[in-house]
Each structure stands twice: as structure tokens, then as C-alpha cells.
Amino acid sequence: MFSYFFKPHLSELMTKKWLGASNAVDTICVTVEDYFNDFARIKKPCKKGSGEDTEGLCDVIEAIAEVFKLTDPSLLYLEISTLVSKHPDIRDDHIAALLTMRGDASREMKQTIIETLDKGPSQPNPNYVPLFKEIIVPTLTVPKLLK
């Protein structure tokens, strides 16, 4: 659908017609903005899934995304502790995997964050539905990396 509409306008770019007086760029920009506005309106209904409430799943994905988006590693503890407070069933191996995937947390930093979080209270909300208990974090060993 997108390529069908954009193809004639994109092929017009970098041509004599485009250098002269073409509105191809304006057409592309207006169309992209229009598509964006359409998709922005349907974003929320898509979160509902097929008849089940998936808001909790979207929240956890957004919380994990915040951990990945964080640019200042010194604020990692705060972001991870927020994630743990909202999702008390998250385990140390989940936290270690998240920090490893970020790539900028040292082994000492990971250990400090995990140890500090282990000391804190974690009273789950009685209505909380565990999300992480079924998620198995595979151990990454050197032989697996060499395959």
C-alpha cells in the first residue's frame, strides 16, 4: 500500500522535474503525517488484543523499554527498582539479562543493583498477576557463543 502510493513521488526526486518545481517532497511529507495521525488514533484499540485486557503486558514492555532507553547508566538502579516495584515477580536473572543486553553495565554494577534490590521489601499487590514467573532466562555460556 505504501510503496504503491510513494513510488511515483519517490522516483520524481533527484530529477530535473524535481529541481524545477516539483511538490513530491511536500506530497510525501503530508501523506506520512496523515498516515501517522491515522495510526496514532488506532494505537490504543490495538492494545486491547483479541478480547483480553493486555494493558498489563503493554505496561511491562514500556517499563523494559525505559530501561533500554536510559542514556545515563548512573540512573539504572532507579529505573530497575521502579520495574521491580511494579513487577515483584521479576527475578535476579531477568535483571541481569536486561543489564547485559544494555551492554554498558559492568559486572560489579549488575551485582550491586541486584544485591540492593534483594534487600528491599517486595510486597506484591494482591491483584497483581505474575508476568515473569514463566519466563526462563537462558544461561549464555562460552560454548553457546562459539556455535
Image (cartoon, grey):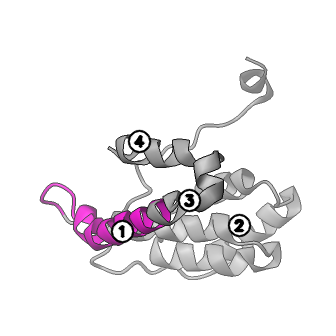
Q: Residue 39 appears in which quarter of the rendering?
A: bottom left
Q: Which residues are magenta?
A: 28-52
Whether residues under marks 3 and 1 lie with C-beta atoms below 8 angstroms apart, the answer is: no
Camera sees residue 8 = yes
How many other residues sit within 10 Å of disc 2, few (<14), some (14-19) or many (≥20)? some
Q: CA distance from mark 4 to mark 3?
A: 44 Å
Regarding mark 3 in the picture, which secondary structure is present there? loop
Majority secondary structure in the magenta region = helix
Whether residues under marks 2 and 4 lie with C-beta atoms below 8 angstroms apart, the answer is: no
Q: CA distance from mark 1 to mark 2?
A: 45 Å
Q: What residue is rendered at 44% in x and 57% in y?
A: 132
Mark nearest the camera among 2 and 4 is 4
The reply to whether the magenta stretch includes residue 69 is: no
Q: What residue is rendered at 70% in x and 72% in y?
A: 70
Q: Which mark is residue 91?
A: 3
Q: Earlier in the sequence, mark 4 or mark 3?
A: 4
Q: CA distance from mark 3 to mark 2?
A: 9 Å
Up-down relation of residue 124 to residue 140 (above or below): below
Q: Which mark is residue 34?
A: 1
Quadrant where the image shows the N terminus: top left
- What residue sits right under mark 4 in the picture? 3
Which kind of residue does numbered mark 4 sit on? Answer: Ser
Regarding mark 2 in the picture, which secondary structure is present there? helix
